Amino acid sequence: MSDTGLVRRTIEIGDPSGGRLAALEFGPAERPLDALLLHANGFNARTYRSLLEPLADLHVLAYDHRGHGRTTLPAEPAGRTDWWDVTNDLIALLDRLEAGPLVLIGHSMGGTASLLAAAERPERVRRLVLLDPVIQPPERRGEGHAGLAEGARKRRSTFPSREAALAAYRGRGAFRTWPEAPLADYVADGFHDAPDGVTLACTGAWEASSYLAQGHDPWAALARLSCPAEVLRAETGSTCALDASPRPDVTVETVPGTTHFLPFEAPERVRAAIRRAVAG
């Protein structure tokens, strides 16, 4: 699980803790930044390497949310009620980057945070590509999340090695539809070294808190959104209640044959959406 070819960055966003975002940079550094990618709950930026590397002419920055991957911002699950912490990290990053309005590419929780941030900072965001974002009807907000949270808390957190973790995950459970490349990349940055092996970078308690902290309002953000958005929904088990375009500049498409992990199941379709957004 080599770092060969990866361009890593750490970015200070003004957090009082002094912690920093860990990021991966893709594409030509001399080109102005085109887009940011925000990952799903429990994942990390590197998980999306095989999605982004073929977009070799585009300049994309993907970063680890607090509580994930190599980011060192504090992640305290107690008392957490919404996703404004990860959204405010994104807003702080947008305010610090020396870049024009950007495309935001967000998967699941990352898609919801992108939507919330775009409504708050319309001058910083020019288009959205939302990959099965978590947008549930208000009356069903958080429905089914208690079971997901309990599963996160019970998830095995330590392995003798990354190779052992990869072998345990391959073809099983939530990873059964994943190709090898994103799974190996998830494992590479999804664990921290420990004295007796490796341990999950995103703790079960933090992952669980993301499932349960549903006090934010994506519908209000959608109503305030001023930039175009392309939403790709999973055909099976989608977390996105939008099944039709709510207005002309927001398109919604259900991608055949996909689950919530559609960035890894239909990468060419996702890359096409990213290219359209950057060119738009």
Image: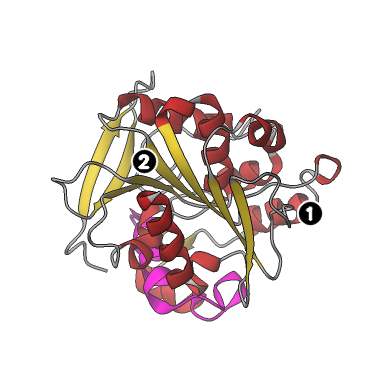
Q: Position of residue 235 (x, y in %)?
A: 68, 70
Of the residues under marks 1 and 2, which one precedes in the sequence? 2
Q: Amino acid at mark 1?
A: Gly
Question: What segment is highlighted magenta in the picture?
Answer: 169-197
Q: Is residue 128 magenta?
A: no
Mark 1 and mark 2: Cα distance apart in space: 28 Å
Q: Nearer the viewer, residue 33 or 280?
A: 280
Label 1 belongs to which residue?
144
Residue at 31% x, 42% y is 22
Disc assigned to residue 41: none
Q: Position of residue 174 (x, y in %)?
A: 60, 70
Residue at 61% x, 74% y is 173
User: Is label 2 in a helix, a strand or a loop?
Assistant: loop
152 lies above or below 248: below
Q: Nearer the viewer, residue 194 or 200?
A: 200
Residue 271 sits in quarter: bottom left
70 lies above or below 126: below
| In the image: residue 149, left or right of residue 191 | right
Q: Position of residue 185 (x, y in %)?
A: 36, 65
User: Is label 1 in a helix, a strand or a loop?
Assistant: loop
Q: Nearer the viewer, residue 35 or 144?
A: 35
* Dot 2 alpha-carbon crowd within 10 angstroms: few under 14, some 14 to 19, many 20 or more: many
Say if residue 127 shows up in the picture.
Answer: yes
**Which residue appears farthest toward the top when viewing the image?**
16
**The N terminus sits in image quarter:** bottom left
Label 2 belongs to which residue?
71
* Dot 1 alpha-carbon crowd within 10 angstroms: few under 14, some 14 to 19, many 20 or more: few
Q: Amino acid at mark 2?
A: Thr
